[in-house]
Image: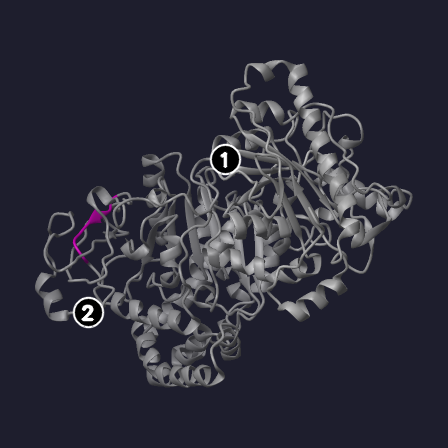
């Protein structure tokens, strides 16, 4: 992570649509009441009758005329006047208390529950009404952020629009969701569907020109999203594609189409096959249940219950996709794939591509690699153990993926502060638990300084209210980050927003960058690319900001440079801190020399042509920082030093007394005074490290073996002592 600097690169109304009182009920259909209300041309306002209702936008592809049907509904789905969905459940997500650094948690459903909910929704959405394709918005999504972007869900082969059912609650907190429903007997062509979606996005863009529109498409919907993006390159679209059907010409189903046409509907093998695709791998379901701590007997019992339930799902599938509709959709897939592939070069939209390793319908992994090369702005994420219906898979969480890729924005460009979505407790728990082993090995000791100058163990000396700027030494490879971030959250409920090197936000390149999951954790936990603009925004929002003036030069230091600061000559951060009255907390970290020793560094690598070429290539490709700086800190060449491991010792952190800048604005306008404060902070960091290096010599539990012995005799959760303060 780096310090910012002056020269751093900064980073439904559909057209012609009509609105009606309820058309679909996501609960059990009441055909008698429904038929009584069929054909009514009521005012598009939502009804205030005792039967809770919902409305949808219905668009005829051939004309703007439409009809309406009304149903009672215990779980409303609808649009308000003029095609706009009202703020849901009274208020926005921004009204929530800001005392917690986490977003509100939403419990994820299991794979079997997702499948059950899908079929319940699909059953009630499926009516042979002969109506045109239409949009509906699920009100169960809950409160959402102010000025949330519009998300248009484009369904796959089923066409019901219920494929996102299991994602509604989390997505609905940050998006305005509209789902496309294509009635069973509808025979709208692929190109007409493209035009319908185009009319919607053009109308919404005209209404809110600064609001981006997300197109989330799976299978057939993926082709639809790409086709729309290709035809509208200047529209602000973001695409999320789950196993898009652009590879249908290579599908194992295509050769079977003539056979499916000849077979009677009673003998159709396609329904059990499609159901098996939706149900996913039973062994994966079993493992997921085991990981959640369910006893084997309960897991086996639930799997047996699933086997008994499956036959009822086949009858629903037959209603969703009767033989004629299934054949029509398969033929549409063929034409959609050809049409989209012929225009793939014109897609300029930022794209998130999600592919499954066990997709038995399409060769999605190979297609993902092809599309990643073909699309201009594409990030690829692979899910090796998942099947074709990705949104129904156990544990799949679309919002978490969006957070991990910084793929969420509410304006024309991404704002790493106002657009940041904090993790939920469940999202935080995963990286926390996966790094627990490292925390145990390092046995971190945290010291802080109270207002009266006393040094105490723990983080009691850390200011509660922001803005706070933590300025310190960057250990080799940034090893100090994980234990520090975890303890700030666990002990003080503070989320540290790190200023990070831009390479953490670059597109993944095989062989040149670390695996995506490594960077995903940084972005999920709030890292922002280094720039003066981002530091300004973070401090203005009263954040707790983590800053390393030595940046990459310290984290990738040479042999014998442990605990040496490589700070710029200019006082980069002081004037910014003073502007917002931020407290500056200098801190030192010690312990890297007890874990490893650099034996093959930058100087050694530059002497070997292979490594020299590799370093130069990576440095040129990734965004550079401090292009105007001089001295050692300007050397930001991207490389990875080789480290010889040691028997683990212990990490030590010492946070000095917070330095107040509030009320010193006039005083620190003077460059000399500002530079004096900068040197004071630097001196404090050096003194913190000197204190720790001296004191750790008297720590009886500096060695991992002594800590293991202590835990063995005092319990695995006991706090391990350290040196006398």
Residue with the mark numbered 1: 466
State which quarter of the image contains the N terminus: top right
- 123 vs 252, left or right, is left
Comparing labels 2 and 1, the label whose residue is closer to the camera: 1
Give the residue at x 66% y 23%: 677
For disc 2, the marked residue is 29
Front residue of 41/85: it is 85
Q: Is residue 703 above or below residue 413?
A: below
**128 vs 557: above or below:** below
In the rendered structure, the answer to whether residue 6 lies left or right of residue 414 reads right
Which of pointers 2 and 1 lies earlier in the amino acid sequence?
Answer: 2
* Picture quadrant of residue 315: bottom left
x and y percentages locating residue 445 in the rendered image: 67, 51
Q: Is residue 342 visible?
A: no
For the residue pair 399 and 700, the one nearer the viewer reads as: 700
Mark sitting on residue 265: none
Inspect the magenta stretch and tell me whether residue 677 lies in it.
no
Q: In terms of secondary structure, where does tag 2 sit? A: loop
Which residue is more in the foreground, 510 or 441? 441
At label 1, counting other C-alpha atoms closer than 10 Å, the crowd grade (few under 14, some 14-19, many 20 or more) is some
- Mark 2 crowdedness (10 Å alpha carbons): few <14, some 14-19, many ≥20: some
Percent coordinates x, y for residue 22 in the rendering: 18, 57
Up-down relation of residue 587 to residue 59 (above or below): above
Residue 424 locus on image (x, y percent): 46, 54
Main secondary structure found in the magenta portion: loop
Query: Where are the magenta residues, as a range?
Result: 16-22
């Amino acid at each position: 992570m780096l310090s910012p600097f002056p020269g751093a690169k900064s980073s439904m109304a559909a057209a012609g649509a009509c609105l009606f009182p309820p058309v679909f009920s996501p609960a059990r259909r009441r055909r008698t009441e429904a038929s009584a209300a069929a054909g009514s041309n009521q005012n598009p306002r939502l009804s205030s009758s005792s039967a809770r209702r919902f409305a949808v936008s219905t668009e005829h592809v051939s004309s703007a005329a439409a009809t309406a049907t009304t149903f009672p509904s215990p779980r409303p789905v609808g649009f308000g006047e003029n095609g706009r969905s009202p703020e849901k459940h009274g208020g926005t997500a921004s009204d929530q208390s800001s005392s917690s650094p986490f977003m509100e948690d939403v419990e994820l459903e299991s794979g079997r529950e997702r499948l059950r909910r899908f079929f319940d929704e699909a059953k009630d959405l499926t009516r042979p009404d002969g109506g045109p394709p239409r949009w509906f918005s699920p009100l169960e999504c809950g409160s959402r952020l102010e000025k949330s972007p519009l998300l248009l869900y484009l369904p796959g082969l089923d066409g019901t629009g219920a494929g996102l059912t299991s994602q509604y609650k989390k997505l609905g907190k940050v998006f305005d969701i509209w789902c496309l429903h294509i009635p069973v007997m509808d025979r709208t062509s692929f190109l007409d569907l493209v035009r319908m979606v185009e009319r919607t996005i053009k109308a919404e863009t005209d209404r809110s020109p600064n609001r981006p529109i997300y197109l989330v498409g799976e299978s057939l919907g993926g082709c639809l999203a790409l086709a729309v993006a290709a035809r509208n390159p200047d529209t602000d679209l973001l695409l999320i594609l789950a196993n898009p059907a652009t590879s249908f010409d290579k599908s194992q189903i295509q050769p079977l189409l003539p056979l499916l046409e000849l077979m009677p509907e009673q003998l159709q093998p396609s329904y059990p096959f499609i159901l098996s695709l939706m149900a996913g791998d039973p062994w994966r379901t079993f493992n997921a249940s085991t990981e959640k701590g369910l006893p084997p007997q309960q897991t086996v019992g639930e799997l047996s219950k699933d086997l008994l339930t499956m036959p009822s799902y086949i009858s629903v599938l037959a209603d969703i996709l009767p033989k004629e509709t299934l054949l029509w959709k398969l033929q549409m897939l063929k034409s959609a794939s050809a049409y989209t592939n012929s225009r793939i070069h014109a897609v300029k939209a930022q794209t998130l591509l999600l592919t499954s390793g066990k997709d038995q319908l399409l060769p999605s992994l190979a297609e993902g690699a092809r599309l990643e090369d073909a699309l201009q702005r594409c990030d690829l994420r692979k899910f090796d153990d998942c099947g074709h219906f990705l949104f129904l898979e156990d544990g799949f969480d679309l919002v978490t993926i969006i957070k991990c890729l910084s793929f969420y924005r509410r304006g024309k460009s991404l704002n790493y502060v106002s657009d940041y979505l904090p993790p939920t407790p469940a999202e935080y728990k995963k990286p926390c638990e996966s790094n627990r082993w490292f925390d145990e090995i390092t046995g971190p000791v945290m010291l802080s300084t109270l207002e009266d100058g006393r040094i105490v163990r723990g983080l009691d000396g850390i200011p509660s209210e922001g803005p706070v700027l933590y300025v310190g030494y960057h250990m080799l490879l940034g090893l100090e980050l994980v234990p520090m971030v975890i303890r700030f959250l666990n002990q003080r409920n503070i989320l540290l927003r790190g200023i990070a090197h831009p390479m953490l936000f670059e597109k993944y390149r095989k062989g040149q960058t670390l695996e995506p999951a490594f960077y995903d954790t940084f972005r999920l936990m709030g890292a922002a690319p280094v720039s003066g603009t981002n530091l300004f925004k973070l401090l203005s929002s009263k954040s707790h900001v983590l800053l390393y003036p030595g940046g990459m030069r310290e984290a990738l230091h040479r042999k014998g440079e442990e605990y040496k600061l490589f700070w710029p000559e200019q006082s980069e951060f002081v004037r910014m801190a003073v502007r917002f009255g931020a407290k500056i907390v200098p801190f030192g970290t010690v312990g890297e020399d007890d874990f490893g020793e650099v034996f093959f560094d930058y100087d050694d690598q530059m002497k070997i042509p292979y490594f020299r070429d590799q370093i130069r290539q990576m440095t040129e490709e990734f965004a550079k920082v401090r292009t105007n700086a001089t001295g050692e800190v300007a050397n930001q060449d991207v490389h990875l030093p080789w480290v010889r491991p040691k028997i683990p010792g212990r990490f030590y952190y010492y946070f000095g007394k917070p330095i107040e800048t509030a009320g010193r604005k006039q005083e620190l306008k003077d460059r000399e005074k500002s530079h004096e404060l900068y040197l004071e902070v630097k001196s404090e960091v050096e003194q913190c490290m000197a204190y720790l290096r001296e004191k750790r010599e008297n720590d009886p539990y500096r060695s991992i073996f002594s800590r293991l012995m202590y835990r063995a005799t005092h319990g695995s959760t006991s706090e391990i002592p350290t040196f006398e303060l």
